[in-house]
């Protein structure tokens, strides 16, 4: 079975994506049994109502990416791209805003980067490796050696940011510095040209 759900179509029929997914799960039957199975396997946990554990959230992303058919790169190609991106990133552990060392490595690991790339390509379509590497290089260079505030590489690619909503439940917004750097390359180059022009006048 392959199911494609368009948020605009859901809204047209006065339903949210979540309502459609829950309704589909109920319609498929044995909803209560599956619900208990999610708890026993620790896919879901009773936290802030019900939450999906991080590992299984990553698995969900991979299922959606692999099922979409939108990712043209093989796992081997994604792994090679992940390795090249990680080489462009600073080594060592991230520091917090107070300069204290955290347990998180800027480069993360190959598996985490591959999973984020799969999700990125599912959302934004396929982008040439050269453009991805160029955007990564420019992002790292923008910190000029002071990496305070730099995102871990997996969050540079894509980060789920929970924003509060009017009903107090919160909703997830996806942030991608990679997409931002890809889409603003021309503006960046124009800024460099303008600076050169100003320097020559002085």
Image (cartoon, grey):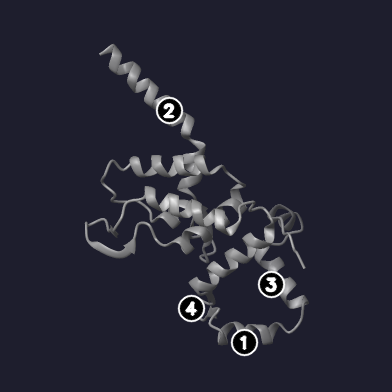
- Rendering coords of residue 158 (x, y %): 49, 54
- Rendering coords of residue 192 (x, y %): 37, 26
Element on which disc 4 rests: loop
Image point (31%, 17%), residue name: 198
Q: Earlier in the sequence, mark 3 or mark 1?
A: 3
Question: Residue under circle 3?
Answer: 22
Q: Is residue 79 left or right of residue 32?
A: left
Q: Which residue is at the far top?
A: 201
Question: Residue under circle 2?
Answer: 189
Which mark lies nearer to you, 3 or 1? 1
* Distance of label 2 from label 1 (alpha carbons): 55 Å
Which mark lies nearer to you, 2 or 4? 2
Image point (51%, 63%), residue name: 170
Element on which disc 3 rests: helix
Question: Residue under circle 1?
Answer: 36
Residue 117 shows in the view: no
User: In the rendered image, which quarter contains the N terminus?
Assistant: bottom right
Image point (45%, 39%), residue name: 134
Q: Which residue is at the far left?
A: 99
Which mark lies nearer to you, 1 or 4? 1
Question: Residue under circle 4?
Answer: 47
Camera-nearest residue between 64 and 170: 64
Q: Quadrant of residue 3?
A: bottom right
* Distance of label 3 from label 1 (alpha carbons): 15 Å
Q: Is residue 163 left or right of residue 15?
A: left
Q: Is residue 155 left or right of residue 16?
A: left
Q: Earlier in the sequence, mark 2 or mark 4?
A: 4
User: In the rendered image, which quarter contains the C terminus?
Assistant: top left
Q: Earlier in the sequence, mark 3 or mark 2?
A: 3
């Amino acid at each position: 079975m392959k199911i494609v759900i368009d948020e605009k179509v859901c809204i047209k029929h006065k339903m949210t994506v979540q309502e459609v997914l829950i309704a589909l799960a109920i319609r498929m039957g044995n909803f209560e049994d599956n619900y208990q199975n999610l708890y026993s396997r620790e896919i879901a946990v009773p936290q802030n109502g019900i939450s999906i554990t991080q590992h299984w959230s990553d698995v969900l992303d991979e299922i959606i990416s692999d099922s979409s058919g939108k990712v043209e790169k093989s796992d081997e190609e994604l792994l090679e791209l992940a390795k090249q991106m990680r080489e462009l990133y600073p080594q060592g552990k991230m520091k917090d805003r107070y300069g204290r060392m955290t347990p998180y490595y800027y480069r993360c690991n190959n598996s985490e980067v591959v999973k984020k790339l799969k999700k990125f390509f599912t959302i934004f379509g396929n982008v040439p490796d050269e453009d991805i590497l160029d955007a990564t290089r420019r992002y790292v260079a923008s910190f000029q050696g002071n990496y305070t505030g730099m995102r871990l590489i997996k969050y540079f690619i894509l980060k789920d940011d929970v924003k509060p909503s009017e009903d107090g439940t919160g909703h997830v917004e996806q942030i991608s510095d990679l997409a931002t750097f890809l889409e603003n390359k021309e503006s960046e180059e124009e800024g460099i040209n303008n600076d050169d022009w100003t320097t020559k006048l002085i």
